[in-house]
Image: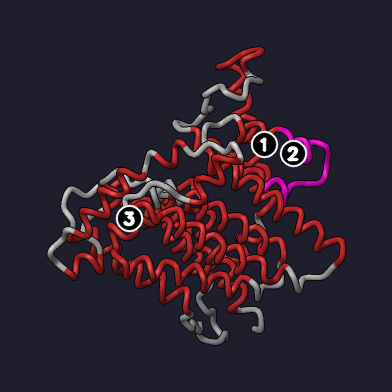
């Protein structure tokens, strides 16, 4: 897959080269490009200087950053192929439904507490796949009974049957955004929803900060955890990660080198770092984390400029899914979780940057 990605980038680079009689190719770097380049440089230096590197996992992180480049270069072609995303999502969803039925039979198939993860190793991976499929089928699938049955019956059943509290919350967030998309199409006004992505990003970042405070303080009490528990939303998979996060933060703080604290003390791909944000601090330091947040915020600024509302809303939902799951999963280290969000990030920057050309 990584090799095919490189081929696609090279091919698209050749396709956009100016032909005879055409103007020279003009490229003007924008803020998201600058941040992604700086993050890539830090990542390469990290790979070159850290020992005991997990080459396979590190390569997957690199391909995620390459997906941004592909989206930046091929935003028009990617936007023309969205119907295939809906078809492939149908395949993924129903193959996992069939596997669940084969493994559990009747009536086990309908038991919500059953721990069958279909084609995936963990319930989080299965829930993430179902949520991604829900987004693509909901936004790009043809309006028919199968579509609505899939996004309102099959997907929520498969997600809620997974032992993963974060995806349960994110599912309802995705439904709210889908409702806003349908409402906008009905009233044909976009002033309010133009602020949706920046608001969702800021809300997500605030949630991330609050949920990660115990990793810095060592105190596992947290107001959001208490709220989730009161709402009967499982937080067990999340809370049990606090001890590991605290150990990592202690390792960072105990370093004698200020430079390592600022730019990272180790390689997150070689540790079981169950958090995108703790993993970035460990690998790229606080400088890397700041650049990552600035990259996300700059993407939000470009997304509101694009004309294609489907792409805008899909970007919103993929960003929420990627950042939200990143609270307790190193999402950028998994191609299933990182490729589409980074691809769409590149697409909105490419589309917004060329809107007036």
Q: Say which mark, if any, is on residue 9.
A: none
* Residue 52 showing in the rendered view: yes
How far apart marks 2 and 3 lie (CA) works out to 41 Å
Please tell me whether mark 2 sits on a helix, a strand or a loop: helix
Magenta extent: 136-153
Q: Can you identify the residue that label 3 sits on?
A: 217
Q: Does label 1 or label 3 sit earlier along the sequence?
A: 1
Alpha carbon separation for disc pair 1 and 3: 36 Å
Are circles 1 and 2 on residues that touch, CB within 8 Å? yes
Q: Earlier in the sequence, mark 2 or mark 3?
A: 2
Q: Is residue 125 visible?
A: no
Does residue 345 lie above or below 241 as drawn? below
- Measuring 23% from the left and 54% from the top, which residue is drawn there? 250
Q: Check if residue 137 falls in the magenta segment.
A: yes
Q: Residues within 10 Å of mark 2 (few under 14, many from 20)?
A: few
Q: Main secondary structure of the magenta part?
A: helix
- Quadrant position of residue 108: top right
- Residue matched to label 2: 152
Residue 44's quadrant in the figure? bottom left
Q: Position of residue 132 (x, y in %)?
A: 60, 46
Q: Secondary structure at mark 3?
A: helix
The residue that mark 1 highlights is 156
Q: CA distance from mark 1 to mark 2?
A: 6 Å
Q: Nearer the viewer, mark 2 or mark 3?
A: 3
Task: Tell us which disc is closer to us: 1 or 3.
Answer: 3
């Amino acid at each position: 897959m990584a090799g095919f990605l490189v081929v696609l980038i090279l091919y698209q680079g050749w396709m956009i080269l100016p032909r005879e009689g055409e103007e020279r190719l003009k490229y003007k770097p924008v803020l998201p490009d600058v941040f992604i380049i700086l993050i890539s440089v830090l990542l390469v230096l990290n790979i070159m200087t850290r020992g005991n590197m997990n080459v396979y996992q590190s390569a997957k992180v690199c391909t995620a950053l390459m997906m941004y480049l592909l989206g930046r270069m091929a935003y028009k072609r990617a936007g023309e192929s969205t119907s295939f995303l809906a078809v492939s999502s149908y395949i993924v969803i129903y193959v996992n439904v069939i596997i669940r039925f084969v493994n559990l039979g009747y009536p086990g198939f309908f038991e919500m507490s059953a721990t069958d993860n279909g084609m995936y190793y963990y319930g989080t991976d299965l829930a993430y796949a179902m949520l991604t499929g829900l987004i693509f089928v909901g936004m790009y699938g043809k309006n028919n009974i199968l579509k609505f049955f899939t996004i309102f019956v099959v997907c929520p059943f498969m997600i809620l049957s997974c032992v993963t509290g974060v995806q349960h919350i994110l599912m309802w967030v995705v439904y709210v955004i889908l409702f806003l998309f349908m409402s906008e199409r009905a009233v044909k006004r976009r002033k309010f929803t133009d602020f949706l992505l920046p608001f969702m990003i800021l809300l997500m970042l605030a949630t991330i900060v609050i949920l990660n405070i115990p990793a810095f303080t060592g105190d596992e009490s947290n107001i959001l955890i208490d709220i989730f528990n009161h709402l009967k939303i499982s937080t067990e998979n999340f809370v049990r990660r606090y001890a590991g996060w605290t150990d990592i933060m202690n390792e960072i703080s105990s370093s004698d080198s200020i430079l390592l604290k600022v730019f990272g003390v180790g390689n997150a791909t070689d540790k079981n770092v169950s958090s995108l944000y703790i993993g970035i601090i460990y690998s790229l330091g606080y400088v890397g984390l700041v650049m990552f947040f600035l990259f996300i915020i700059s993407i939000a600024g470009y997304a509101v400029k694009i004309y294609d509302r489907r792409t805008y809303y899909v970007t919103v939902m993929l960003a929420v899914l990627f950042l939200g799951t990143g609270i307790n999963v190193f999402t950028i280290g998994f191609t299933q979780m990182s490729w589409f969000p980074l691809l769409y990030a590149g697409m909105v920057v490419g589309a917004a940057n060329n809107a007036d050309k």
